Amino acid sequence: MKEQFEVIKVENQSMQLKINRSDTCHSCSAKSGCGTGVLSNYFGRYSVFNAPSQKNVMEGDIVTLEIPTGELFFRAFLLYIMPLMMLFVGSYVGMILFPTTEIWHIFIGFIGFIFALLFVKLFY
């Protein structure tokens, strides 16, 4: 996946990039039911983030960054599927440890979900 970003600030080892989130949303027929299209109405129209600096890049330049497809799918799995799996695994562990009390199934499942989110945040 390739995207073009505008360089808005260049520092020693990093550059600050800006991308318009809703450029393609205006032409999409599913924008009213799409999460990105709906959220772009409530939040800013662009995202800003930092990336490692590249040679000969100045403020105002347009740079293209590429994310390999395998990496994109792996990150999507970590962000969406892994917390859900840990929710179910935690609930199953709760069922094994406390077979008669349903509140513990829910609580331990929720702990598994939170643990997965924290794991992804801290290590990826």
Image (cartoon, helix red, strand yellow):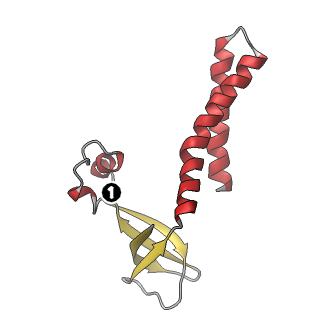
Q: Residue 46 versus residue 88: which sits nearer the camera?
A: 88
Residue 38 shows up from this direction: yes
Most distant residue in the front direction? 70
17 left or right, relative to 13: left
56 left or right, relative to 24: right
Q: Residue at x 57, y 83 (%)?
A: 12
51 left or right, relative to 82: left
Kind of residue at badge 1: Gly
Most distant residue in the right direction? 97
Q: Residue at x 69, y 10 (%)?
A: 101
| Vertical comparison of 2 with 106: above or below | below
| Vertical comparison of 57 with 67: above or below | below
| Vertical comparison of 101 with 9: above or below | above
Residue 53, quarter of the rendered image: bottom right
Q: Secondary structure at mark 1?
A: loop
Q: Residue 82 versus residue 6: which sits nearer the camera?
A: 82
The percent coordinates of residue 36 (x first, y second) are 35, 50
Most distant residue in the bottom direction? 56
The residue singled out by tag 1 in the image is 44
Q: Residue at x 29, y 59 (%)?
A: 22
Number of numbered tags placed on the structure image: 1
The percent coordinates of residue 26 (x first, y second) are 22, 57
Q: Residue 110 versus residue 58: which sits nearer the camera?
A: 110
The percent coordinates of residue 27 (x first, y second) are 21, 58
Q: Residue at x 30, y 48 (%)?
A: 42
Q: Quadrant of the C terminus?
A: bottom right
28 left or right, relative to 82: left
